[in-house]
Amino acid sequence: MARGRADIANTALRIFLQEMGAAYDEERGLTPYGGTKDFAKVKEFFGGRCCYCDVELTGLSAAQDHLIPMNKTSLGLHAWGNVVPACGPCNATKQGGDWRDFIIQRAGAQAAERHARMRAFLNAYRYDPGRDLREVASPQRQLEGGRLGGGERLQVAHHAGQPQHLVPKGGELGR
């Protein structure tokens, strides 16, 4: 089946956010999040339970959800601290929604405890990219095979010692 233009754009965006996530992980001194091979550690942090509704996860019922969705609106990264364990129903229902609101909806009276657990998780991995990906993903650049045009690797640009946004190694992006 032929893929539409929107499908291709979404695939390119996901590749871009995965590459940005790997660069962000490296900047924080972490090995880039490796998906299934690292998911066991994430599940362990949450005690083998869904981070939203607290149901016990079994092998096939556990999904890797992105707290901040990997879409053109939210620009969540595929990185340590943004990937959490969810049961199938929560993963299917949350979609691109805000995780804070979703916890309130799913956890009811236990929402405060789940919010605290989620903040502990975010703090453990220092997930707070503080970047403007819209600037980095300028229209002049083309995504090719999960890298910016020319196959450039990415790094975090700093201002006053604080990470600001991700750029190709060796300089700023042209406009």
Image: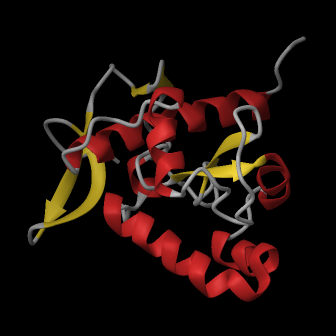
Tell me: residue 79, above or below residue 46.
above
Q: Which residue is pictured at 27% across the width and 35% down the height? A: 31
Tell me: residue 69, above or below residue 154.
below
Q: Residue furthest toward the right? A: 1
Report the side of 145 relative to 129 (left or right). Answer: right
Q: Is residue 130 visible?
A: no
Q: Based on the displayed image, in which of its 4 quarters is residue 97 positioned?
A: bottom right
Residue 136 at what x, y percent from top left?
38, 49
Q: Based on the displayed image, in which of its 4 quarters is residue 169 positioned?
A: top left
Tell me: residue 146, above or below residue 125.
above
Tell me: residue 130, above or below residue 143.
below
Q: Residue furthest toward the left? A: 161
Viewer-side residue, 38 vs 48: 48
Residue 46 at what x, y percent from top left?
54, 58
Question: Quadrant where the N terminus lies?
Answer: top right
Report the side of 29 relative to 4 (left or right). Answer: left
Q: Which residue is pictured at 21% across the width and 47% down the height? A: 27
Viewer-side residue, 60 vs 142: 60
